[in-house]
Amino acid sequence: MILAAGTPARAHNMLIDEYQGWGAAIVWITYYSVLAASSVSIIKMMVAELRSGDNTTREIVIYLVVLSYFGYLTIESVYVPAETVIAVVAHAAAQDPSMQSRAFTAFVALVIGTAILTVPLVGALLVRTGWDKPGRYCRRIRPLWRDLTDCYPEVVLERPATGTAADSISQLHRMTMEIRDCLVRLNRYISGVPPHRAAGSEHDELCDYARRISAAVAAKRSGQLPPPAGRTEHYTRPAQRRDLEAELNQLIELSRIWRRIHGRSGITTAISAAVPDRSSRSPC
């Protein structure tokens, strides 16, 4: 419709507002009806987000800025066509024949509209490719998770049906729970492994814990029975963080140490760590 209505102006090598006439009215009614529909849709989205109450200060500021601009654009989408129709009926010249103000409005609308579409699109692509934050955490703890669940496959929770979009947050939660369950089941094996060195920093404790887990997994895989309850030493695992973020960071660090250990020796030979050489250098 815009191309057809603008044909007379193009034939005279003029801007649509320079030529004026009903062609200009049709062009602006058509163009701004699309902007108005988009603006109203985005305004509804912003209002719904603000009413949810679960927003950070930064999100509230962004919503208010977007809401303000598209509120202005909605008013503009009504005003410009109405002004053009009135000018055509009155046979008056356009107030802005060079169309600078309308070009600026269209440019800003294009930039902001593209940004609003781009942000969730990029977020969706990151989730789909596993490069969002929970997805990156899943990759970091997967080596530890894989080796532990190989020993106890029954702890693995049911996964979504094939073809269902992966939810990295739920996946991270499941993997964390399954690692915990495996460590609880391995506890008697872990307690039966002699300490490698005296406890020191938190990193040293995690190194010792990772080595104990490695030896416990190797023993479990080789078919050994766990030591009797009365014959295992009293071992206290590194303090578990109560804060979820801190606990996850601790698990990621444990998995990082796990990869370093098995990058050197391999889990199949980890059983030899059950009787370590105290003078040997720690793999951590």
Image (spheres, rainbow, N blue to C red):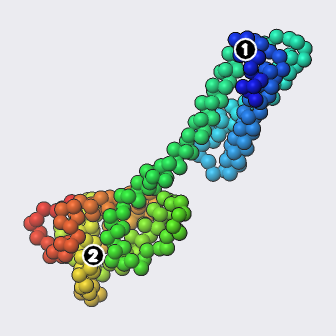
**Which residue position is annotated with label 1?**
11
- Give the image location of residue 23, x and y in percent: 80, 21
Q: From where the camera sits, is residue 184 visible?
A: no
Of labels 2 and 1, earlier in sequence is 1
At x 26%, y 87%, the residue is 225
Q: Nearer the viewer, mark 2 or mark 1?
A: 1
- Distance from Cα at disc 2 to Cα at disc 1: 81 Å
Is 51 situated above or below 264?
above
The outermost residue toward the right is: 90
Q: Amino acid at mark 2?
A: Val
Compared across the picture, whether 194 is left or right of 250 comes to left
Could you tell me which residue is drawn at 18 percent across and 69 percent down? 196
Residue 42 appears at what percent x and percent y?
69, 41
Q: Residue 230: which quarter of the image?
A: bottom left
Picture disc at residue 217: 2
The quarter in which the N terminus is drawn is top right
Report the front residue among 35 and 281. Answer: 35
Residue ID at (72%, 33%): 35
Q: In the image, what residue occupies the spot 27% across and 63% down?
A: 258
* Crowd around label 2: few <14 · some 14–19 · many ≥20 (10 Å): many
Choose between 113 and 161: the one closer to the eye: 161
